[in-house]
Amino acid sequence: MKIKLFGALVASSLLLASPVMAQKKSLVIGMGSADAGKLDPHLASTTPDKGLLNYVFNGLVRIKPGEASPDFIEPDLAESWTSNANGTEWTFKIRAGVQCHHNYGPFTAEDAAFSLKRAATKTTSSYSGDFASVSNVEAVDPTTLKITLKNPVAGFLGYVANINGGNMVCKKAAEEMGENFGKKPIGTGPFEFAEYQPQQYVKLVANKKYFRGAPQLEDITFRYIPADSSRDLAFQSGELDMIYGKQDQSWVDRTSKLPGVKVKAMEPGELSSLYLNIQSKPLDDIRVRQAIAHAIDRKSIVQFKGAGSSREAVSVVPSGYLGTDEKAPLYEFDLAKSKKLLADAGYPNGVTIKTIHTTLTGMQTLIEAVQAQLKKAGITLDIELVEHATYHSQIRKGLSQVVHYQAARFPVADVYLTQFFDSASIVGTPTAVTNFTNCNVADAEIRAARIETDPAKQKALWKTAQEKLVKEVCAVPVYEQLQLWAWKDNLDLGYELHGSLNLSPAITEKTRFTK
């Protein structure tokens, strides 16, 4: 009895001495890529990079966390703004007291002006074309920024929001680091850069001086795990708290059955299109391009990818954008027409075209499905697979006859039409953006719409532009892929998630673990 009593007392004292389990404060995210691309927000163009940098940077305005529509624009680094009657002069009141990361000082109107000029410069920005209508940016005083436009710009606030070129950098840090800024990005967001291990992870730590309040999380580890199976296993074993999902319905169905897990197919849908270089043989023959368009069965693609996580493309601009022609005259699936067009073009025995393509799994499965469909029409698609960052580099050099590109942009038709179809955006030119087609058939309408102040006339111009681009087969829209993510249900994002233009759930100062 004495021995039993002594043992019970020891056990009781040990229990009393044990610390209460500490609240989890570290978030680990698994991303489906081999490595970071570019950690400079004005150069970053890949899904993995844009999601990560959204935790580090702010815009002058932002789309409310959890939303993907400009209807939800709200103040960010600018606490208020005004514009003149025709929308050519904008004045932003910069929030006082915001601090740049790593003790780079207060963020002022001078930093904002520097950021916009940097975003408008080809050598320092992938989004310079977005700011072609900006004639002047001026820091009137430390808290007042004035932007003058050459002409009104549809959805202008989207260009200064927390996406792409609208991300605000800190002038002193950017000037001090120059080309190395992407190795240690300095922003004003809720989390600041701490460490980068190539092909392994980026670590961010809480910005205790964040103007909306110190984050409830202490740090974020953004791990690069390109293999879907490895990422899923790490998630199931508890190594990861949140993961970028394999972009198909089978993954949604399987992951949704896991206990203690939330799965979300969120907006926006990235439009997956085949961009055809119309100056490259045999694609310089419109009959070959038409044959490709007729060989694509969009309904089968959506069935393959999953109707719960994807939808058919409606135009060369994604559905739901301001100005999208929701009933654009896309070529219908017709193998007989496809084969006849090839024969008429002088290729009765078929034709071979080439593409450089990413190993990013969601996109790779799509191009392989497209390859199988084209084969039935006698079109051989020769695919050269490369790592995602290499893919982006090579397609921007015009090295691929066919570019399969999957993208979402600020939801106004002008942005998509300008970046992918204006001749000023043709890759390999001084003003290049993402026009892989060498198409220029809709320049007049795209440019006229950009400065048109009558909304009805503007939409009519955008509609005509889309009709011309579809008819010329500059690109073949295939489907739209929603963003698939999963996280443990003890992670409270701090908002209701419907979407994110940065293509990953926002991690804010309010995000926390509940247990």
Image (spheres, helix red, strand yellow):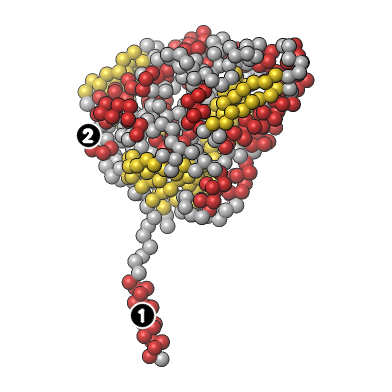
- In the picture, measured across the screen, residue 250 lies left or right of residue 339, that is left
- In the picture, measured across the screen, residue 120 lies left or right of residue 291, that is left
Residue at 32% x, 45% y: name it: 206
Residue 98 vs 274, above or below: the answer is below
Residue picked out by circle 1 = 10
> What is the CA distance from the residue labelled 1 to the residue labelled 2?
55 Å
Residue picked out by circle 2 = 105
Query: Would residue 39 be seen by someone viewing this image from the given angle?
Result: yes
- In the picture, measured across the screen, residue 351 lies left or right of residue 16, that is right
- Local secondary structure at mark 1: helix
Image x and y of residue 43, in percent: 40, 27
The N terminus: image quadrant: bottom left
Which corner quadrant of the image does residue 13 belong to?
bottom left
Image x and y of residue 454, in percent: 48, 13
Which circle marks residue 485 in the picture? none
Crowd rating for badge 2 (residues with CA inside 10 Å; few <14, some 14–19, many 20+): some
Crowd rating for badge 1 (residues with CA inside 10 Å; few <14, some 14–19, many 20+): few
Amino acid at pointer 1 = Val
Mark 1 or mark 2, which has the lower sequence index? 1
Residue at 60% x, 14% y: name it: 280
The C terminus: image quadrant: bottom left
Query: Would residue 467 be seen by someone viewing this image from the given angle?
Result: no
Residue at 46% x, 19% y: name it: 433
Image x and y of residue 225, in percent: 49, 43
Contact? badges 1 and 2 (CB < 8 Å): no
The total of numbered circles placed on residues is 2
Amino acid at pointer 2 = Gly
Residue 26 vs 131, above or below: the answer is below
